[in-house]
């Protein structure tokens, strides 16, 4: 299939500018142009997937699906390069997939966010091609964690009715198609019983409630939550008190939510099939809607089918903090960087490079560079946090790294000629905790 030249150039730019800023692994990409054939996707799309280094069998795919519009599509192009989401994928031998649709603002988003318009078929086709490129044939049948923002949540809510047996869990950030199909604005899907077995979290921004533009994100996810809980489905509701339609710091709850669901649902590594384990919605923790107090399900006194469902105690504690503050704290330091290298450069400069894995709980804010135990710089010099905590990979409105992607690199312009120096690199996570120093070999 012919590729779109613009998409290839964009991908090359991202790889050139950010190739080092990813955990150890491989990136693969496939792209499809818009089709004019009936029933096929009428927009172009690029799928980028990251596969952890050394994984022998992919156990699942974490799909980070952007929302509607040109800005969202561009934001989605970097999703597979996100160090923090890669840490979740690596923990569970999963791939991280970031679709990026080629939609301009004048085109109808439902050409792709309703998967019945061809995006479901193209998504499945991409998994076949990516499995061949990566030499991981298990990608074709691997189960999915679906994260969707706005139109991405719309897409995920319809995918759950089409492929419920393939879905580990879903995170709906400010979007679902539920109210749209209930109002008859799109064809109402048949909802199989298996759909009500999928763990889900509805995560609107509290400032969307009664907002002139985004109120539907609040009312839609609330309506879906109530309808699905009435059926006994394991669904939670986690309003973000600080945000409107932007994603804010939702990843600090989304990642532990998926972590818990993967733990509950994935088959064993040596299992003959990839069939997901069922969820016992009667277990876990429950909380009264729009409160911040959760308790074990067997101790909850209210109507269970009206309560917020949470998979375990750890997620319940994180949820309680998140719905109060809009983020989740962390008390453990990050892991140290690794493969720190120093290379003498021109004009007496020294280049320091390294690899790093994101802190699982709170990602990476920055790296501190030391020469002979004294701080000489920080990467980035001033971490940016326009939509949430300041991070090494500055986070966009869409919960993806801002392009161009930063490098794991620092140039020391001040070493003294003829003296041996020792360099150290320290990881700082998003709550300010520091790792142990990672030491590089001395250079002349």
Image: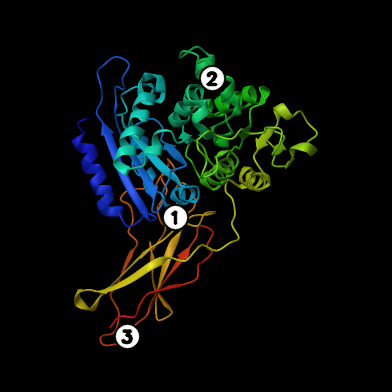
Residue 348 is left or right of residue 362, and the answer is left
**Residue 265 appears in view:** yes
Residue 362 is left or right of residue 138, and the answer is right
Q: Percent x, y for residue 286?
A: 71, 37
State the residue in front, 208 or 95. Answer: 95
Q: CA distance from mark 2 to mark 3?
A: 66 Å
List the residue tagged with mark 3.
420
Q: SS at mark 2?
A: helix
Residue 311, by quadrant, is: top right
Q: SS at mark 1?
A: loop
* Mark before the other along the chain sequence, 2 or 1: 2
Q: Quadrant of the C terminus?
A: bottom left
Kindly report which numbered mark, 2 or 3, lies closer to the viewer in this rendering: 3
Q: Percent x, y for residue 63?
A: 43, 37
Q: Which mark is residue 179?
A: 2
Q: Percent x, y for residue 300?
A: 78, 36
Residue 147 is left or right of residue 349, and the answer is right
* Name of the residue lying farthest toward the front: 272
Who's the residue at 72% across and 42% down the image? 293
Residue 47 is left or right of residue 310, and the answer is left
Q: Quadrant of the N terminus?
A: top left
Who's the residue at 63% across and 27% down the image? 233
List the residue tagged with mark 1.
391
What colour-coding does the image apply? rainbow
**Mark 3 crowdedness (10 Å alpha carbons): few <14, some 14-19, many ≥20:** few
């Amino acid at each position: 299939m012919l590729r779109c030249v613009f998409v290839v150039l964009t991908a090359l730019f991202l790889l050139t500018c950010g190739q080092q800023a990813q955990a150890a692994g491989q990136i693969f990409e496939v792209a499809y142009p818009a089709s004019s054939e009936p029933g096929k996707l009428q927009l172009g799309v690029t799928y980028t997937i990251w596969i952890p280094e050394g994984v022998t069998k992919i156990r699942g795919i974490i799909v980070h699906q952007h929302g509607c519009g040109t800005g969202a599509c561009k934001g989605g192009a970097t999703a597979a390069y996100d160090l923090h989401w890669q840490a979740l994928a690596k923990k569970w031998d999963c791939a991280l997939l970031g679709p990026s649709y080629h939609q301009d603002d004048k085109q109808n988003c439902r050409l792709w966010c309703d998967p019945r318009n061809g995006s479901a078929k193209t998504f499945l086709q991409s998994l076949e091609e990516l499995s061949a490129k990566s030499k991981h044939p298990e990608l074709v049948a691997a189960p999915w964690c679906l994260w969707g923002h706005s139109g991405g949540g719309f897409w995920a809510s319809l995918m759950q009715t089409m492929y419920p047996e393939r879905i580990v869990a879903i995170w709906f950030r400010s979007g679902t198609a539920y109210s749209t199909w209930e109002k008859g604005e799109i064809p109402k899907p048949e909802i199989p019983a298996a759909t009500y077995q999928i763990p889900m979290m509805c995560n609107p921004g509290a400032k969307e409630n009664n907002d002139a533009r985004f109120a539907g994100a609040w009312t839609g996810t609330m309506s879906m939550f109530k309808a699905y809980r009435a059926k006994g489905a394991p669904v939670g509701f986690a309003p973000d008190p600080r945000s409107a339609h932007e994603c804010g710091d939702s990843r600090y709850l989304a990642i532990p939510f998926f972590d818990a669901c993967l733990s509950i649902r994935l088959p064993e590594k040596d299992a003959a099939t990839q069939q997901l384990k069922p969820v016992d919605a009667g277990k876990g923790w429950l909380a009264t809607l729009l409160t911040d107090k959760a308790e074990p399900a067997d101790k909850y006194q209210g109507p269970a089918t009206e309560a917020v469902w949470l998979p375990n105690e750890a997620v319940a504690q994180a949820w309680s903090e998140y719905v109060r503050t809009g983020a989740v704290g962390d008390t453990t330091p990050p892991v140290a960087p690794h493969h720190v290298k120093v290379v003498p450069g021109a004009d007496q400069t020294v280049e320091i490079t390294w690899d790093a894995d994101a802190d699982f709980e709170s990602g990476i804010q920055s790296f501190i560079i030391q020469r002979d135990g004294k701080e000489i710089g920080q990467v980035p010099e001033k971490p940016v946090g326009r939509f949430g905590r300041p991070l090494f990979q500055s986070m966009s409105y869409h919960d993806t790294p801002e392009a161009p992607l930063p490098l794991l690199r620092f140039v020391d312009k001040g070493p003294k000629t003829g003296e041996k120096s020792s360099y150290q690199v320290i990881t700082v996570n998003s709550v300010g905790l520091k790792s142990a120093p990672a030491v590089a070999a001395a250079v002349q």
